[in-house]
Amino acid sequence: AVIHMGIHKTGSTSVQEESRLKIDQLKEDGYDLPWDVCRNYGKKDQNHLLDNQLILTANQVNLATCFMNAASKPYFTRRYPCVPCLLLAGSEIAQRKRNVFISAEDFTLLDKDGLKVLFAYLSQWDDVTVIIYYRRYYSWLASNHNQKIKDRTLKDGAEKWDLTINDYIARHLSCDGTDYHCESYAYTYFVVKRVKNYFDNIVIMNMHDESKGESSESMFCHAIPDANQTCRAIRTAKKTSVTLNQRQELVYGDLVYGAIKAGLIEINMQDQLDDTIKAVQKYHEETLNLTSKDFKRACLDADQLALLWKKSLNFERALVELGMPSSGENALKADFDKLAKSTLCKLDVELTLQDEAWGSFFRALNDQKNK
């Protein structure tokens, strides 16, 4: 049995999509997938038909939640309820003496009791491999922040519009990884720390190790045992592969929201907001001939940066000691210093709007909208 636990923001969506596209090759390699077996149940017996959105997805979150304590995570388990058909499908795969491949980032949310039950369930197989990906802590926090707010709308409140990268990082610097309400609970170091109490064969994949290729290639060619046909298919189709669930540029939306709060422009409808953000981006990139990197930024203070670096370095060192391939501490420091001046900084909205060019731009846009 091979269990891919993510973590979030390490290319899991691409891995899951490739497992769907390359399902025939996975079968040739001896791997069956519960969602596929469960789908076949529905074809044979109408009583097994369930909501396709719960079954026909390579992200087996509805299997992962079968091992969660619904009382401690009521919202999550209601949103992604356990689908017993997936559990039955996994057991059938074991009875046929076939390997199983299960991928779900939300295995990272399991506490010790959930992991204990998962261990018992996976005892149906003689060999169990748990694959957990690693992303540098500071980079993972930045990506998580982007994921959390990138789909914000006019109806969203301050939790999305006022949550800057600086505030988000400051919140997590105080987390110790024991409280599942804090997203760092699902970070590689803390997940591995919990998982190794139950599983011996844990493969920690370093997503920064370029020698292993992008996420799908590193998974099917290096992490999963004996997935030769799938690996070959992945490499053959490599030129046409697409990265899913990508990062979204937030600064243009931040600037528009700041202009709304400053009274420079009035926006009451979502399409107005979308059009204004596009107009701001076009003005900045085409008229001013600048990029998003040219905006004035407000970065973390020295103490916050020092603590973030210390945590990031210690996490990587600890995981390397557990067998994860290192991409080098010099590379880690160089990347940290680069992001500390860019991705890890919020847009300085107040300073940007003090520029008369931007003030005039928003006032003109508002006048045009009101005509």
Image (cartoon, rainbow, N blue to C red):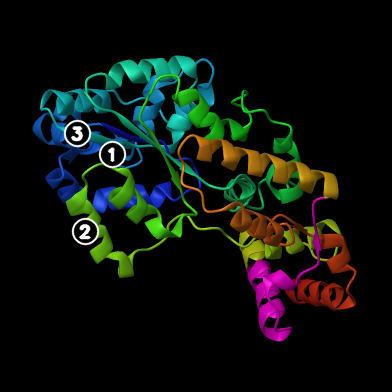
Residue 199: image x %, image y %?
38, 23
The stretch in magenta equals 275-300
The quarter in which the C terminus is drawn is bottom right
Residue at image mark 3: 99
Magenta stretch holds residue 285: yes
Mark sitting earlier along the chain (2/1): 1
Residue 362: image x %, image y %?
80, 72
Q: Of the residues tagged 3 and 1, which is closer to the observer?
A: 3
Q: Is residue 168 visible?
A: no
Which residue is depicted at the point 21% across and 23% down? 126
Which residue is depicted at the point 31% across and 42% down? 57
Q: Amino acid at mark 1?
A: Asn
Residue at image mark 2: 232
| For the residues bearing labels 3 and 2, Cβ distance under 8 angstroms | no
Q: Secondary structure at mark 1?
A: helix
Taking the image as shown, residue 188 lies to the left or right of residue 174, namely left
Magenta stretch prevailing secondary structure:
helix
Q: Secondary structure at mark 2?
A: helix
Q: Nearer the viewer, residue 106 or 79?
A: 106
- Mark sitting on residue 236: none
Q: Of the residues tagged 2 and 1, which is closer to the observer?
A: 2
Q: Amino acid at mark 3?
A: Asn
- Give the distance between the C-alpha atoms of the residues marked 2 and 1, in whole angstroms: 30 Å
Taking the image as shown, residue 196 lies to the left or right of residue 342, namely left
- Give the distance between the C-alpha atoms of the residues marked 3 and 1, in whole angstroms: 24 Å
Which residue is depicted at the point 75% across and 58% down? 257
Q: Secondary structure at mark 3?
A: strand
